Image (cartoon, helix red, strand yellow):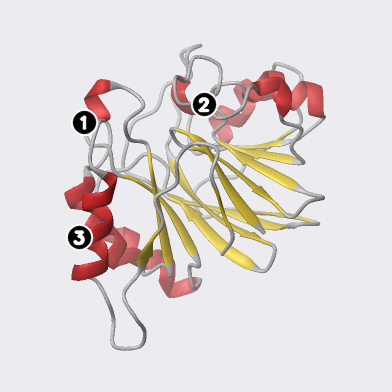
Amino acid sequence: MDIRFLGHAAFELSDGDTSVLIDPFLTGNPKAAASADELSPTTILLTHGHADHIGDTVAIAKRAGAPVVAIVELANEIGEDGVDVFDPNLGGTVEFDWGWVRLVPAWHTSTTPKGTVNTPAGMVVNFGGKTVYHLGDTALFSDLALVPRRDEIDVALMCIGGHYTMDRHDAVHAADFVQAHTVIPCHYDTFPPIETDAQAFKGDVESKTGYESRAPEKVVVLEPGDTHTP
């Protein structure tokens, strides 16, 4: 399974046959590594409904015939556009032939461009025998530590940009909580308010974290378009 960073908080998980797209904000994204019409995902996952996450979801879903997984209020809005949706709430799991996705809490806000208020989520995704945790947009909060009590996290996709989410300093503590084998930072450098030093984050995590049972987390800093294979 490959993880391709598409810029901002958008990622594609792919095994060559199946593709899972997360938060496809591409049109209008100055860091986008692909255009919306280049992607044909099997499934689309949304952490929340802000414009820089919902992005091109409807257009891609209609063209590719891909269902969308989003928290219930957001799923209802997208469903009105003629897209097939799955509508779990926090704690809910949706199963597919390729694996499953579970919604977990994120501490943030969310209103769609159409005005639908919805609750943000993180997404724990099991795909290709690996478990990937996209934290979504979140502040640092202690319940992040509950997620690895249920599932061992192979890769955490973690916001570090600050201003709208936790910054790189709080994200070091989030990495402690999540205990992922690998952390990939995202949601930074797209716009001036969220510019930060990803290499400094990498150094802080790798020097300050670690548990008795295993080595410290590895941080992989991807440029938009880069791919990581866990």
Task: Please name whichever residue, 36 or 107, is drawn nearer the observer in this view of the structure.
Answer: 36
Q: Residue at x 25, y 31 (%)?
A: 195
As shown in the figure, which amino acid type bears the numbered disc 2?
A: Ala
Q: Amino acid at mark 1?
A: His
Query: Which of the 4 quarters of the picture holds residue 1?
Result: bottom right
Q: How many marks?
A: 3
Residue at 37% across, 46% down: 106
The quarter of the picture where residue 216 lies is: bottom left
The reply to whether residue 168 is visible in this rendering is yes
Where is mark 3, residue-wise? 204
The spot of residue 180 in percent (x, y) is: 41, 67
Left or right side of 43 for 73: left
N-terminal label among 1 and 3: 1
Q: Which mark is residue 50?
A: none
Of 28 and 174, which appears nearest the observer?
28
Alpha carbon separation for disc pair 1 and 3: 20 Å
Query: Is residue 78 or residue 56 the one in the foreground?
Result: 56
